[in-house]
Image: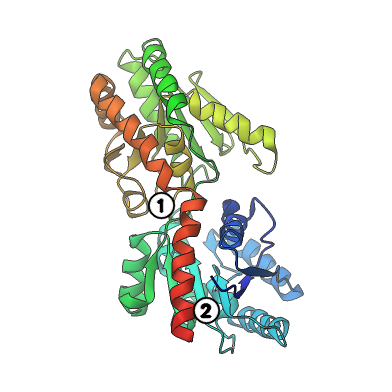
Amino acid sequence: MKKINIAYITKEDSQNKIAWSGTSYNIYRCLYKTRHNIIRFGPYNSFFEKFLKLVELFYKLLNVKYDPDRNIFMSKIISKRIKENLKNKKIDLIIVHDCPIISFLKTEIPIVIWTDLTFDLYQRSYFNNYKKFHPNSVIQGNYLEKLSLNKANTIIYSTKYAEINAKKKYSIKKNKIKIIPFGSDILPISKKKFLFVQKNRIKNKKKMIKFISVGIDWDRKNMDKSIQVIRELNNMGNKCSLIIVGALPPKNFIKPKFVKIIPYLNKKIKKNILKLKKLYLNSDYFILLSKAEAFGLVIQEATAHGLPLILNNIDGMRYVADRKYSLFVNKDNSPLAIAKKIVNLDNNLSKYKKLSYNSHSSSFNNNWDVVSDKLINLITDITLKKI
């Protein structure tokens, strides 16, 4: 395989393991595994960005979401800086995940955009807790998105969900889009260990059914509803507990006795990764009733430990998880209705075992090594077309 020079360009520092939930760093690792020459560019910051952050804070006081990353002037500044950085360097391919940074980039080098959502989905799905998304941010965001998507030679989305929207909203042709899901930060446990863990789960959940939910944004991850579901399970005579990892509750939150909250675990720290893995292993179910979700990397982490999933049936989840190992519930279902569905599943031992087994089996296709192999083939196709 002939090595090519790939520029991986990010607005943030791609060496930061927690930026963009670690995905920026993991994309770099994935690129590195292709054995091509990877040159990192970024971060790209400016004084103007600091001003826009202040504007964002001002509008937040008015309960309006202003997006400092979707600004035409900022995009032009960064695109110009990227062009200067690329000057006199032999680059065969550019890969980015953040559309606005290349909206105005003038180059003959093929560009690949690899991301999880379109701007349209992002602004319509992620900010229901705001009164509105600032109209100017919507206009500029869609404009920059379309410029970037049209400029790219190939667009990689992590789910079909984003592909459908890109074709409908931005008129992007299907042959330009590829689907490559992101990989899990955590490798799956061995089959031998899984069988041992599954046996213990079946034995121990007779005394206490343990649920785990992982995420940063309390409101968007709908942690309140997950708590209500577990409360209903307990009211029905089941002994259940819930561990919430990462998300911090709002002020004046009264924590029920059956809930344990563990603050954000920085995966830069090895002991935190080990702690998170232990929490997954000591749980019986993974529950995530998000109001909106782009991809849900934590779903991959849960399957790496063979956990059956309880998920809201929304686009960002049903395109990532599978009914073979998931219990999908309607987002409008009451906590009691969801609790009853969980009881029916938990009382069916053969179904629980099957979901658990399928969950663990699926995780071997959801790690960054597998993703890297898919990427090698795609990069080869792109470079051959260029020749």
Q: Are marks 2 and 1 in contact (CB under 8 Å)?
A: no
On screen, residue 70 above or below 212:
below
Instruction: Give the class, few, some or many, for how many residues have Cα within 10 Å of label 2's Cα (few <14, many ≥20).
Output: many
Q: CA distance from mark 2 to mark 1?
A: 29 Å
Q: For the point 66% across and 41% down, which residue is it? A: 266
Q: Secondary structure at mark 2?
A: strand
Which residue is label 1 attached to?
Answer: 292
Instruction: Give the class, few, some or many, for how many residues have Cα within 10 Å of label 1's Cα (few <14, many ≥20).
Output: many
The answer to whether 123 appears left or right of 56 in the picture is left
Q: For the point 26% across and 20% down, which residue is it? A: 349
On screen, residue 371 above or below 207:
below
Quadrant of the image occupied by residue 340: top left
Residue 111: which disc?
2
The answer to whether 337 appears left or right of 281 in the picture is left
Seen from this angle, which residue lies furthest right?
Answer: 47
- Nearest to the eye among marks 2 and 1: give it: 2
Depth order, front residue of 339/364? 364
Q: Amino acid at mark 1?
A: Ala
On screen, residue 152 above or below 322:
below
Depth order, front residue of 50/265? 265
Q: For the point 64% across and 68% down, which residue is it? A: 38
